[in-house]
Image: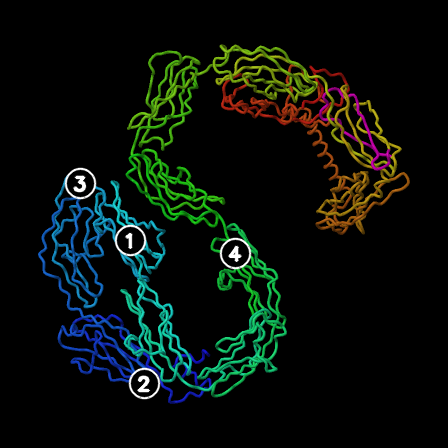
């Protein structure tokens, strides 16, 4: 049957003109209640009573009333005025008497009827309330002892409307309420414990009745408090409720209020728990100092147990509320008014829900169906009213009523039976667009009574329902699933009933479906990172297309934050991910015909969130230095919490410094903490997962543990002297958290080791004690014990310490010095006598230095090297020595006091091979010759005997290496001839001593023919007022050669002074010419002389800065020859005088030997007197200072800036060279002047001629 027949009647009338449906004018309208009074109506004295009942209908509606189920006629009642208006059955009750309203109390119901049926209002309960009065009573004084609890009753008169209670005094001042003094929901005033300040004679309860706008007050209550010298502590006891448990019924959708008020001393605190599950934090509030729990919008999930816990330091008391959630009836499916045609079947569903299960009853035209005669047309089945084979005479108004103990529901629904011709409401020749694979819906909305039958035909007049993809709907719509391209075409809808037959055509076009070829993928990302989602799709080319991104169903454009989201070319990039960014992201590809969506889940992980709340309980355990800490779980941010870190802070002793008390597993939310005595504990908890720790929780309240005797003694007790006649006892002081009291002291005891005499002792505050007047290096037994105001710590352990040490008196005896090679020797000695050490032997100090030098000036410049070896070692290797040199060695034993006397010995190193020559230069002479120039080696390491020159052609020529022995040590150059002009060579040059050749210096190069014509790349020139700089870039691989630079003036200025040519090298890169004339043009030529000709290599022009020379007119004596000669003679005399002064100064002046040495060009050192020492620079003994082993196995040489503390854990003191104790042992290196020895004359290890390294 067509749904079009089932519209509500008013809508049908409104729509009939636009639908061009001819509705008969005589068609009537069933009654419909449009306005009525509320279900509960409370009236007060002198108030007017108004009962409303408005209804619509055609023909005109008639009204009647019942009161308490009995017919009530308002027009016949005195003091009742009926409203004279169309569609209204309302009436008003007024009277001059004060109690008239009580006469009209009852349950009213309105009925509205016309020829089509009767509608019914819900029940209206009218309640009359008189003026409130407090019952007369005699209020006796309330006497109570200080510290006890008391309840001041209120008991206001009952009222149908909620009232407000206030406690005030006679001065209209509110009674102050806090955790100790509280007013309950019943209006009583509760005192958890009474204090002297509570003593008053005017505690007055006021009740405010909102309906009557009246405030009445109770007689004042006199509270008398007896003072006491000692109030007795007692554990909590609940004043309300008084029993252990209670059962409450809460209505769904309404608020729930639970209350617990306790007494005790100290004043108890209240907390609420829900054993059956977590509290709904978003709907729960705690009021009245946590004594009242308010739960908003109660639902079925709130059913269960709620527990309040009152506690103080002495114990706790509790009450269990067992809450059952019930509900007034509410609709699941409400019956609806409908239009029907003859022969149809009507089904009115009335489905309700509630707790307890509501009772459902049906009425027809206001009469219960049970009171109607048996009629086969209707039946009640599963709560639904069913009427079959409807006829126009079956038009009626039905009522479904559901009730339980919490309320009542009523619904009016009419059945209207009409007869109309078939009409198709859908426009003719509509075009429908759809995509392949989807379902198309071709509309054919019909109207008529009886309901028209609908058929869908193809263009050949055959039914389309033969294809299983085609299916009809009861409202006439044709559905076509799994659309194909060949479904495009014309379809015909035909509607017919017993009065007529009509047809329309529908056109269907099938388009390509939108498809996502690459959609976003679910991913897990860390907070702060970025993520990229991709979306690619294909569309029908004839349709407008778009791709959009959504998060959790909302468009990203709606969310804003353009800095966070970047969308381009089918890509979505999210920057700086946060936990709020996680969710379901979808790519939506759409046209006007279809929408395709591909979803991906983004999960953001990271360290946990903060623990939201901490709670301390079991405070009575503080006497045992324990407390229970509970906390709410932290947000794990999609990574399971592995553990919780519990920390504490003591704001008195160490503010803003947190210490860890330990960690507990991540599934644990409480623990009992073992605490230290006398610590002001403030706790915090931090959650930790695999991504690290989260933010710490808010801090807890502070608890203080009681004092106790120390449980620990100091550690690291030592006894060492810093003088020969004392002992300094030191220890690591106790941490403040181990004091167990506000202050701690230390009891120090000592006595000589091996004696059984009495202990000497002293109590100190600081972590050290100096014992004076002791013998040198004597062992002592030492004990240090912690004490505080509560007692002593445990018995301390005995530690052995020693009094102060003296300088060692033992001189180590040398055993042997063995030469290992030219730069290393093995030194051996005999162990010293321990009795002569005068302390703990810390090791041996070896000092060694070069003896003898051709440059001897001052002893203070001698560079000495040091090595420290451990006490259990009697030999060591000195390496990195200079070959062919004499050394002096000093060996001393040392203890913590300092160095002992020295044993001395000298030794000499043999001759070694020299170092590499200092420089090697190649100069092209011709196409077949090269000139090699070099400088002697910096380190001779003996007497030079000559050089070895080797060279080898490079490439695939296969030539063998050629070598020349150059036996002249004074030789500085060598000319190689008969070289191939087309080969590149590698040259090796080595200096030799009698030990053989040393390290080689290597160069590569070729002749002039190989390098080709000299090429001056980047030739340029810049000029100043009187100079010019010529620059060029040497070509890579070009042989070095010499050439001339010539400066010539240009133009009319050729009469200027002649500038001689200058010889420069190709690898020099630049040349500066001075003494040029300002503002003058110069031509610069680069020339190379060959035996045959002069070759121009390049030229460039430049002009100097400034103003050029101005030619003056001839007249004037300044241009005369006699004047020029006179001035020249004066200048010549001045120059002669300056030269004489300079010569005199050079002969008689003073200058430092060091400066003179620095100016020497020749590497040969001048001989010095034997009795003077040489001068050593910073760079001397370079090889000498190489790495040596340390005390732990590798002794490291002690350089001039090293201290003995750098060598091993037992060596922690430093000394002067004379053995005296100093704060740091160091020596200053001096810069060494460069030099060499070109002489081939005789030399010996005692008087070396080579420079010192």
Task: Judge whether 688 appears above or below 601 on screen.
Answer: above
Task: Judge whether 571 appears above or below 542 on screen.
Answer: above
Callout 4–callout 2 Cβ contact below 8 Å: no
Residue 354 in percent (x, y) is at 33, 64
Question: Quick one: label 3 or label 1, which is nearer the N terminus?
Answer: 3
Structural distance between the alpha carbons of marks 1 and 2? 54 Å
Horizontal side, residue 837 vs residue 489: left or right: left
Horizontal side, residue 914 vs residue 930: left or right: left
Q: Which residue is mark 1?
A: 322
- Which of pointers 3 and 4 indicates the residue nearer the eye? 4
Neighbourhood count class around disc 4 (C-alpha, 10 Å): few under 14, some 14–19, many 20 upward: some
| Closer-to-camera residue (138/890) | 138
Horizontal side, residue 1041 vs residue 1231: left or right: right
Q: Residue at x 71, y 50 (%)?
A: 1107
Structural distance between the alpha carbons of marks 4 and 1? 41 Å
Residue 885 in percent (x, y) is at 68, 18
Q: Which mark is residue 521?
A: none
Q: Residue at x 32, y 49 (%)?
A: 273
Residue 800 in percent (x, y) is at 42, 17
Callout 3–callout 1 Cβ contact below 8 Å: no
Q: Which residues are magenta?
A: 929-958
Q: Which residue is mark 2?
A: 115
Question: Quick one: label 3 or label 4, which is nearer the N terminus?
Answer: 3
Question: Quick one: label 3 or label 2, which is nearer the N terminus?
Answer: 2
Q: Does residue 824 belong to the magenta stretch? A: no
Say if residue 593 shows up in the picture: no
| Closer-to-camera residue (671/1036) | 671
Q: Which mark is residue 231?
A: 3
Task: Judge whether 63 appears above or below 687 on screen.
Answer: below
């Amino acid at each position: 049957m067509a749904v079009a027949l089932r519209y509500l009647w008013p809508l049908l009338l409104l729509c009939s003109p636009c639908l061009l449906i001819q509705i008969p004018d005589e068609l009537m309208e069933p009654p419909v209640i449009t306005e009525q009074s509320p279900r509960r109506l409370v009236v007060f004295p002198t108030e007017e009573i108004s009962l409303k009942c408005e209804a619509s209908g055609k023909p005109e509606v008639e009204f009647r009333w019942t009161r308490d189920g009995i017919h009530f006629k308002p027009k016949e009642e005195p003091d009742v005025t009926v409203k004279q208006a169309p569609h209204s059955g309302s009436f008003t009750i007024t009277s001059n008497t004060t109690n008239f309203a009580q006469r009209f109390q009852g349950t009213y119901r309105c009925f509205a009827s016309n020829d089509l049926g009767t509608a019914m209002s819900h029940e209206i309960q009218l309640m009359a309330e008189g003026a409130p009065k407090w019952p007369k009573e005699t209020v006796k004084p309330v006497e109570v002892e200080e510290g006890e609890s008391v309840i001041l009753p209120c008991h206001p008169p009952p009222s149908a409307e909620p009232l407000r209670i206030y406690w005030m005094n006679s001065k209209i001042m509110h009674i102050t309420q806090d955790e100790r003094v509280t007013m309950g929901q019943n209006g009583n005033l509760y005192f958890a414990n009474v204090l002297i300040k509570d003593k008053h004679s005017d505690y007055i309860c006021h009740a405010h009745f909102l309906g009557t706008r009246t405030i009445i007050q109770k007689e004042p209550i006199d509270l008398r408090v007896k003072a006491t010298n000692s109030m007795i502590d007692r554990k909590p006891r609940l004043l309300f409720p008084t029993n252990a448990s209670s059962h409450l019924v809460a209505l769904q959708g309404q608020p729930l209020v639970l209350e617990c008020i306790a007494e005790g001393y100290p004043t108890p605190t209240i907390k609420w728990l829900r054993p059956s599950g977590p509290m709904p934090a978003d709907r729960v509030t705690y009021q009245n100092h946590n004594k009242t729990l308010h739960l908003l919008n109660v639902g079925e999930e709130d059913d269960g147990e709620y527990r309040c816990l009152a506690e103080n330091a002495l114990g706790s008391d509790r009450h269990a509320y067992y809450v059952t959630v019930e509900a007034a009836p509410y609709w699941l499916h409400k019956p609806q008014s409908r239009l029907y045609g003859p022969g149809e079947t009507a089904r009115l569903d009335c489905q309700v829900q509630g707790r307890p299960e509501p009772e459902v009853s049906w009425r027809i035209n206001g009469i219960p169906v049970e009171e109607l005669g048996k009629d086969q047309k209707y039946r009640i089945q599963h709560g639904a009213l069913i009427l079959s084979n409807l006829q126009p005479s079956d038009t009626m108004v039905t009522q479904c009523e559901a009730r339980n103990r919490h309320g009542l529901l009523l619904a009016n629904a009419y059945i209207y039976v009409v007869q109309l011709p078939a009409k198709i409401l859908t426009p003719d020749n509509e075009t429908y667009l759809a995509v392949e694979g989807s379902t198309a819906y071709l509309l054919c909305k019909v109207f008529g009574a009886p309901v028209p039958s609908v058929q869908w035909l193809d263009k050949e007049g055959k039914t389309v329902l033969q294809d299983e993809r085609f299916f009809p709907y009861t409202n006439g719509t044709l559905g076509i699933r799994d659309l194909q391209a060949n479904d495009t075409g014309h379809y015909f809808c035909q509607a017919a009933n017993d009065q007529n037959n009509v047809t329309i055509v529908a056109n269907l076009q099938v388009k390509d479906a939108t498809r996502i070829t690459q959609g976003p993928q679910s991913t897990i990302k860390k907070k702060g990172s970025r993520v990229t989602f991709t979306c690619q799709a294909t569309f029908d080319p004839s349709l407008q297309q778009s791709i959009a991104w959504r998060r959790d169903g909302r468009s990203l454009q709606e969310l804003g934050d353009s800095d966070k989201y970047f969308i381009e070319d089918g890509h979505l990039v999210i920057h700086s991910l946060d936990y709020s960014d996680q969710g379901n992201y979808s790519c939506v590809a759409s046209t006007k015909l279809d929408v395709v969506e591909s979803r991906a889940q983004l999960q953001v992980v990271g360290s946990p969130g903060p623990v939201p709340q901490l709670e301390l309980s079991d405070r009575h355990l503080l006497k045992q230095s324990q407390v229970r800490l509970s906390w709410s779980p932290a947000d794990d941010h999609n990574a399971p919490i592995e553990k919780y870190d519990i920390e504490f802070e003591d704001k008195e002793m160490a503010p803003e410094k947190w210490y860890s008390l330990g960690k507990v597993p991540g599934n644990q939310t409480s623990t009992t903490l073992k605490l230290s005595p006398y610590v002001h504990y403030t706790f915090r908890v931090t959650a930790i997962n695999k991504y690290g720790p989260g933010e710490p929780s808010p801090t807890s309240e502070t608890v203080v543990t009681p004092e106790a005797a120390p449980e620990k003694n100091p550690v690291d007790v030592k006894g060492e002297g810093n003088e020969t006649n004392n002992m300094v006892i030191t220890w690591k002081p106790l941490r403040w958290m181990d004091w167990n009291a506000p202050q701690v002291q230390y009891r120090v005891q000592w006595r000589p080791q091996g004696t059984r005499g009495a202990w000497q002792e002293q109590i100190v505050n600081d972590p050290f004690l100096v014992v004076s007047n002791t013998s040198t290096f004597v062992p002592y037994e030492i004990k240090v014990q912690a004490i505080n105001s509560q007692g002593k710590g445990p018995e301390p352990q005995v530690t052995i310490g020693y009094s102060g040490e003296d300088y060692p008196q033992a001189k180590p005896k040398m055993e042997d010095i063995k030469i290992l090679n030219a730069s290393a020797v093995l030194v051996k000695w005999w162990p010293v006598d321990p009795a002569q050490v005068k302390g703990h032997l810390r090791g041996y100090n070896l000092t060694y230095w070069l003896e003898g030098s051709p440059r001897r000036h001052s002893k203070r410049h001698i560079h000495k090297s040091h090595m420290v070896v451990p006490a259990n070692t009697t030999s060591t290797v000195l390496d990195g020595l200079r070959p062919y040199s004499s050394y002096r060695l000093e060996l001393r034993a040392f203890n913590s006091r300092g160095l002992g006397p020295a044993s001395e010995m000298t030794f000499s190193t043999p001759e070694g091979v020299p170092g590499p020559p200092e420089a090697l230069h190649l100069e092209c002479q011709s196409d077949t010759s090269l000139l090699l120039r070099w400088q002697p080696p910096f380190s001779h390491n003996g007497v030079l005997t000559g050089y070895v020159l080797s060279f080898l052609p490079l490439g695939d020529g296969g030539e063998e290496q050629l070598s020349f022995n150059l036996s002249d040590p004074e030789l500085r150059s060598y000319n190689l001839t008969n070289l191939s002009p087309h080969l590149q060579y590698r040259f090796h040059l080595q200096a030799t001593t009698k030990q053989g050749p040393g390290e080689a210096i290597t160069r590569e190069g070729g002749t002039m023919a190989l390098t080709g014509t000299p090429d001056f790349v980047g030739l340029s020139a810049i000029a100043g007022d009187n100079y010019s700089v010529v620059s060029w870039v040497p070509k890579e691989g070009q042989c070095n050669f010499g050439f001339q630079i010539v400066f010539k003036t240009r133009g009319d200025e050729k009469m200027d002074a002649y500038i001689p040519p200058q010889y420069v090298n190709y690898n020099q890169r630049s040349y500066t010419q001075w003494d040029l004339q300002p503002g003058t043009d110069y031509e610069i030529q680069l020339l190379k002389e060959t035996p045959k000709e002069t070759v121009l290599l390049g030229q460039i022009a430049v002009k100097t800065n400034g103003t050029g020379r101005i030619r003056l007119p001839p007249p004037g004596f300044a241009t005369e020859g006699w004047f020029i000669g006179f001035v020249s003679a004066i200048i010549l005399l001045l120059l002669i005088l300056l030269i004489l002064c300079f010569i005199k100064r050079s002969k008689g002046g003073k200058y430092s030997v060091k400066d003179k040495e620095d100016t020497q060009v020749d590497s040969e050192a001048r001989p010095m007197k034997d009795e003077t020492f040489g001068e050593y620079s910073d760079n001397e003994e370079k090889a000498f200072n190489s790495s040596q082993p340390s005390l732990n196995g590798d002794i490291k040489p002690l350089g001039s800036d090293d201290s003995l503390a750098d060598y091993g854990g037992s060596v922690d003191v430093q000394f002067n060279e004379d053995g005296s104790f100093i704060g740091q042992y160091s020596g200053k290196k001096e810069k060494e002047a460069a030099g060499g020895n070109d002489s081939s004359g005789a030399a010996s290890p005692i008087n070396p001629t080579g420079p010192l390294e």
